[in-house]
Image (cartoon, helix red, strand yellow):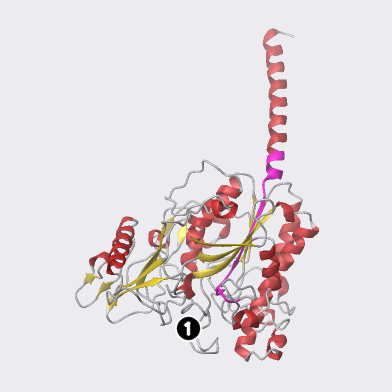
Amino acid sequence: MNKKLLVSFVLASLTGISTQAKEKMSSETTQQRPNIILFMVDDMGWQDTSLPFWTQKTHYNEAYETPNMERLAQKGMMFTQAYACNISSATRCSLITGVNNARHRVTNWTLERDKTTDRQSETVQLPDWNYNGVSQVEGTPNTFVGTSFVDLLRQSGYHTIHCGKAHFGSIDTPGENPNHWGFEVNIAGHAAGGLATYLSEKNYGHKRDGQPYSLMAIPGLENYWGTGVFATEALTREAIKALDKAKKYNQPFYLYMSHYAIHIPIDKDMRFYPKYLKKGLTEKEAAYASLIEGMDKSLGDLMDWLDKNDEADNTIIIFMSDNGGLASEPAWRDGELHTQNYPLNSGKGSLYEGGIREPMIVKWPGVVSPGTRCDKYLMIEDFYPTILEMAGVQNYRTVQPLDGISFMPLLKGTGDPSKGRAIVWNFPNIWGNNGPGINLNCSIRKDEWKLVYYYETGKKELFNIPEDIGEKHDVAAQHPDIVKRLSKELGTYLRNVGGQRPGFKATNKPCPWPDEV
């Protein structure tokens, strides 16, 4: 054998051994990395559960039955001050990009390309916000471009599964398709933020010939049409099929279990509806409760799958909702309006606590102490860096600046990133409904204080949240120094991130920033 050939043979042999060793190390590392399930509920209020996130039980906690949320909380940590945005699109765009809604400018809900969803006003000109949503690529107007944390997970070796509601981008934009965000599997996710119906008898929004009769028709569940299977159950069964497949891949998985429940229409889940009638709830409230328990059963089914497949000890479960519970529509809810999230004020669409404070639980065996509570606050964009840290993904690059801060110190009990931290909401829009804290406003929370500013009127409200969780006592007049300080911080932040504000039609001038009033 000549010298060159011998050297080549030796190098090739060494390279082969090195490659095998690397592959073995990579395989071992991959197996040790945790699976992650983000269980996201749509429009679930802080009190839509039998698990009390307040210091005491309320009549809502007594009315609803969510045994699997209780089961999850016994094994994990409850977060009593977890915040999202007041509207679904804003929350989900912050989640996938790690960016505050003032920066990404998807401040109201999205659906059709190049069409705004705002209710119009005779006095106020609304800003040209990003009604086409978010995307991973340039080229679509009124779109924020960002790197997806899911894509980073996928690139690092995770098998990524999307099941349920997406609502990242409008119809016919790149952001509408979860596959474009790094999800290798997409079950029923598309542009719509709601659903036509939960009922298989109505083919989840499709005609007999298979054509959708609504932009909200759920795609991809044809096998369940006419079977009597409620949409929540159908999605759960499909998610479990995807997990069965993922189990064979010998790699960690990320499942985004993103339910359409408990968004309107409040269809009756007949597995649970009769029970709530017997408990004395009205027909509307019994239907609402049935959606909640159907969602909770889904959580339990996924936890059962983990147990049966020996994955429970190596799987993180994060439970969260995208905005507060619906409290402004008498067509769907009974009782006095804006009280359905008691003790919190108002609900979905509002920058009061009822619209933005969410039920959140994290189970992480061996890391998070079971049966614990955390009363520190965090924001939806914090999920981005936290999930990547959970997965061991480091030194990643994004095209967008990240506003999210990892809440790992809260999970491990090693620190408090909420101390002295300001979190901000911006809603220079007009939603479909009116109510307390709804429309044309922005807000800042820092430590115990929360300021709400209304663009059109210049009104400012100040609340001490720990002492006044229901935001019933505006103490702005008593603390002008705090109002001034928070107004400056809020106005400065909004300007720095390119936040938007409405304007006055009469004068053709923009509404003042909070620190200009």
Q: Which residue is mark 1?
A: 338
Q: Please tell me whether residue 264 belongs to the stretch shown in magenta.
A: no
**Residue at screen point 69% across, 64% down:** 74
Residue bounds of the magenta highlight: 27-48
Q: Is 160 placed above or below 517 here? A: above
Q: Position of residue 273 (x, y in %)?
A: 69, 85
Q: Position of residue 402 (x, y in %)?
A: 44, 51
Secondary structure under the numbered disc 1 in the rendered image:
loop
Q: In front here: 167 or 32?
A: 32
Look at the image and tell me in which quarter the C terminus lies: bottom left
275 left or right, relative to 502: right
Q: Position of residue 209 (x, y in %)?
A: 65, 78
**Residue at screen point 42% across, 65% down:** 448
Give the quadrant of residue 143.
bottom left
Q: Is 38 placed above or below 204 here? A: above
Amino acid type of disc 1? His
Total label count?
1
Give the quadrant of residue 425.
bottom left
Q: Is 294 placed above or below 3 here? A: below
1 left or right, relative to 124: right
Q: In front here: 197 or 388?
A: 388
87 left or right, relative to 362: left
Give the quadrant of residue 300.
bottom right
Look at the image and tell me in which quarter the N terminus lies: top right
Give the class, few, some or many, for how many residues have Cα within 10 Å of label 1's Cα (few <14, many ≥20). many
Q: Position of residue 11 (x, y in %)?
A: 68, 18
* Residue with the most extreme left position: 507
Q: Please tell me whether residue 38 belongs to the stretch shown in magenta.
A: yes
